[in-house]
Structures are given as structure tokens and as C-alpha cells.
Amino acid sequence: MKNKLLKISLFGLILITLLNSCTKPKIALKLNLEQGKSYLMGYQTDMKMNQKIMGMSIDVKMKIDMDLLFKTIGYDKDSNYIMETTYQSMNYKMNAQGQDIEFGTDKTSKDSIMSKVFSSFKGKTFTITFSKYGKIIDVQGIDSIMTSFFNDNYFTDSTKINEIKELFGKNFGEESIKNNFSSFFGYFPEKEVSIGEKWNNNTSIKTMFALNIDNQYQLIDNKNELYNIGIQSNIKTDSKNSTMEVQGMQMKFNMKGTQTGFIKLDQKTGWIKESEIKQKIVGDASMSKSEIPGGGNFSIPYTIESTTKIFLK
């Protein structure tokens, strides 16, 4: 008798679970953009980095502010959105060991090469092609911005030109834009989801070295004409793209961490209304150079914490 009652109870629980899952409405999260419509977006990143070199602790604080204007100018043959993207402003602040560095499009210092560099981006336009699920299909126009910038003859030292080209290529080149913007827009599930449902995707961010990010998203609610999505992610260095050269020395990064945050989407357009992502990454960079006494091998421990906010202005 007890076994029979237990079977009936288990069957009842299974039935209730199935009924609940069937009654939850499914939501198609995707872009629904109108041609000619513009979105002015603000991007703010605050970062704190600590590194220990030969027993000395070095603290660095950085703040990056950037405004980008996105405008839907058409569609490709597969009905993907073609968006004209214009740099409105880019400003950078850094404090390292008590010394402040500041440059950007809003700075007019004639002596600051980097302010001239950033100012050259102001008003420049390139195009990004998005699928309805936020996947970046194509980026066009970044290379011409780079070419015009280096034709302005800010640098006379050919070695310095090559260094700046490599730096800007990694951070502002077409491949970098494609990878980094994928992390901003690659959160849509390619299926309908219910409130409370989770989904995963993987992204990669490439700057001086590459990070792989395993993202888990969850649709929290759909209140106030917004879809609220929660984020929890694991981060680790891409072992195939983890080295960089610094003053003739090879530096290999071994980093891992987590990120948490939220994204709020406009229910009508699927466009970002507001988001905030917090990251904490720890690890080290190992360096080697045969000329260094004692074998020339040592590591630099790193801790990096950052908060990135994106918002519609």
C-alpha cells in the first residue's frame, strides 16, 4: 500500500512539473530594429589592477569613457541589420603610483600625442552587421580609419609607429571590434525561453592577450517594458593566445576569474537599455630572458577588478 501511494505521489509531482513548464509563456529574445533609428550608447569601465614585481606592490586605476552612436541604415540579403557606428567620444584616465595620466577626444592638449590619437577617432564611422540574435556578421571601415590616422603623421619614429599600429590593431582593429562587440551583443538565446530559464554561450575577448568567457544567462523577469537578464560567467586565459612581447621579453599570462551582472533590454526593440558587468580576474604573467641573472625566469602576480556599464543616453 505504501509503495502504491509513493508511486502515485511521484507521478503527481512529475505531472505538476510538466503542467507548470507547459503553462509558462515562451519569449523570443532578439533584435527588432527600425531602419533609420539611432541609439546613443555610453560605455564606462572602471578598473583596478594590482601587480607585484620583486616584492613591490604596484596599484593601477583606469577609467575609460566612450560614447558610440548606432544607426540602422539597412539590411543585407539575409535580413541582417547593417548599423552605421560613429565614435562620439573616447576618454581615458589612469593613476599609477600616484601619477595621473589623462587623454581623449575631449582633451585639447597640444603636447599630448595620445589626445591627438583619440581625437582622430571622433566623428569617424564604420559599419557593423548584426544578426537578429546579436551575432556580428561583418565589420567594415575600421582599417580606413587606421590608415587615415597614421597618414596624419603624428609620429616620426618608425619603431614607435609600428608599436602604435600593433597596439591599436589589437584594441580597435576589425577582428578586435568583432570579438569585443560580440561580448556586448552575444547574449540572445537562439530559441524561445521562459522566465527563470537559463542558457549558455561562449565568447572571447582579445586585447593584449585573449580571454575565453563561458557565460550563463537567465531571464529573470519582464517588468516595466524591459527584459531583465542575469549573468554569471567563468573566465580563463586562452592558452593558444596568451603571450605578448614586452621590451624583448616574452610574457605569458595565466589568468582566471568570474563575472556577474545584468542586462536590461527594451522589449520592443531588443536593444540594450542598461547593463552592468563586474569582473574579478587573478593569475600571473611569467617572463623569461636569458640575459637576466639567475636564469631569467620569474612571474608577476596580478589581480584585476573591473566594472563595465553600458547605457542608453
Image: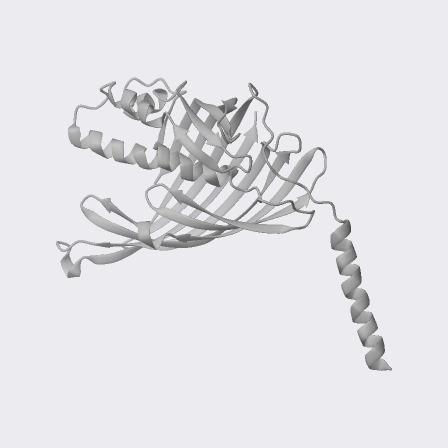
Q: Is residue 104 visible?
A: yes
Q: Is residue 99 visible?
A: no
What kind of colouring is applied to the model shown?
Answer: one colour
- The location of residue 105, given as percent across then percent down, is 39, 21
Which image quarter is the C terminus in?
top right
- Side of 18 relative to 269 (left or right): right
Toward the viewer: 271 or 167? 271
- Side of 188 relative to 256 (left or right): right
- The location of residue 125, given as percent across then percent down, is 41, 21
User: On screen, 24 above or below 76?
Assistant: below
Q: Quadrant of residue 190?
A: top right
Toward the viewer: 236 or 133? 133
Residue drawn at (22%, 19%), measured in percent from left and top?
153
- In the image, farthest residue toward the left: 291
Residue drawn at (47%, 43%), measured in percent from left and top?
306
- In the image, farthest residue toward the right: 1
Which image quarter is the N terminus in?
bottom right
- Side of 112 relative to 130 (left or right): left
- The location of residue 179, given as percent across then percent down, is 41, 39
Toward the viewer: 217 or 65? 217
Toward the viewer: 210 or 105? 210
- The location of residue 169, given as percent across then percent down, is 31, 34
Q: Quadrant of residue 168?
A: top left
